[in-house]
Structure formats: structure tokens, C-alpha cells
Amino acid sequence: MRNRGLTVRHIAATALTVLLLTGCAQTKDFLTGSSTSESSDGDVGILGAPEAEHYLAELQRLAGGDPATQAEIFADAQSGFQLTPGPQTNLRYALVLATPGHAEFDPDVAASMLREVLARTELLTQAEIALATIHLKTAEQIAVTQAEIQRLRGATSRAAQNQESATNQHLAAIEAENRRLRRELDEAERKLEAITSIERSIREQE
């Protein structure tokens, strides 16, 4: 069972690593082509919308920061989402939730929020739409992977419980058999003692 547990953990680590690398590659492509795409499409942006670099710089700080920095970024994003909900504050909070490596990472909630954000793309810049789309895909993949990990852990746990139950039943059967044999042995010893006593009495009479 120890080997099966190691296999589950190996699958989990490998899957998450692949997903994170995929997300990084997609974000790099987005950064490389963002300025060209925006200028060619004539996107003049939305008033008050942060630049893509602003989002990405914060996410980089979140992913590589210490726990105090991560908690500060999360609290600020959550506060903005709760006090001044809107396309940009919702997107920022969803991106924070979708970024692995900190205590509040929640791909399920992040994916749900990003889908809601993308449902009103007229309120987003092209850069924000691209950023939300990339992180939505990554969050959904990670959520699926986590669900599979939980399923495997559950299956492993159930298999271990079943094996333990079977072992306990086997031990109980062995103990019951031992008790039966001891009873039969005691009975045989009593019979032997009775026969020996009879033979001794016959010899004494003779």
C-alpha cells in the first residue's frame, strides 16, 4: 500500500507541474504578442483598467513572495472584490485565487469567477480577456487534476480499509479455530486421564 501512496503523490506532483508549466508558457506568449495585438486591433483600452503588466507583476509577487506578502496581496484583492465589485476588481481577485503557491489558492472558485468575468467581455480590455482566458483554462485543468487526486486517495484509503478488514477477519477466524482446537485438546486430555485412572484401578484390583 505504501507504493500505491507514493504513486498517487507522484501522479499529483507530475500533473500539477505540467499544468503550471503550460500556464507559464501561455502567459509568456500572451506577453509577447499583447502590444502588437492591441495596436493592430485599435484597442484604446477601457478607462481605469489596469495594464496587463500590472496584473502579471502582482501575480509574480504572489507566486514568489513569502507568506506575509502573499497574505497581504490576497487580503487587498479580496477587499477590492468585496467593497468595490466590478470587472477589474473581480478579475484581480479571481487571478489571485487561480495562482498556485499560496494558502488561499482555490482553482474551483477561481474558475467560476473567471467564467463570470468572461461573460461580460465588453467591460474588459483585450489584454484582460486574454489573461482571464489563460488562467481559466489552467484553473479548470488543475481543478480536474485535484479531483482525480482526491478520487485516487479515496480509492487507496478504501483499499487499505478493505485489506485491514480482511486481515482482521482472517485473524478472528484463526483465533476461533485456535479456541476450538484448545477445547478439543482439553476434552481429549480429560478422556485420556479418565482412561488412565480406570487402568490404574484395574491394576490395583489385580
Image (cartoon, rainbow, N blue to C red):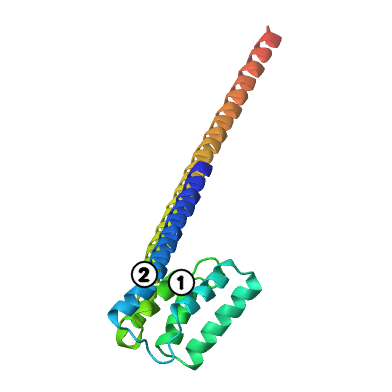
Residue 15 sits in quarter: bottom left
In the picture provided, is 107 more to the left or to the right than 43? right
Q: Nearer the viewer, residue 65 or 26?
A: 26
Indicate left or right for 28 with 102 as reference. Answer: left
Q: Mark 1 or mark 2, which has the lower sequence index?
A: 2
Quadrant of residue 90 within the rendered picture: bottom left
Is 29 above or below relative to 195?
below
- At label 1, counting other C-alpha atoms closer than 10 Å, the crowd grade (few under 14, some 14-19, many 20 or more) is many
Question: Which amino acid, mark 2?
Answer: Gly
Q: Is residue 143 visible?
A: no
Q: Secondary structure at mark 1?
A: helix
Which residue is disc 2 drawn over?
33
Would you say residue 2 is visible in this rendering?
A: yes
Q: Which mark's residue is nearer the viewer, 1 or 2?
A: 2
Of 191 and 151, nearer the camera is 151
Q: Is residue 185 left or right of residue 17?
A: right
The spot of residue 178 in percent (x, y) is 56, 33
Going by the numbered disc 1, the residue's amino acid type is Ala
* Residue 83: image location, x then y, percent: 50, 93
| Marks 1 & 2, CB-CB < 8 Å contact | no
Q: Which residue ends up furthest to the right in the rendered image?
A: 204
- What residue do we see at 45% from left, 81% from top? 51
- Quadrant of the drawing holding the C terminus: top right
> In the image as oriented, which residue stretches furthest toward the top?
206
Q: Position of residue 143 (x, y in %)?
A: 41, 65
Which residue is identified by label 1?
98
The residue at 46%/54% (across/down) is 12
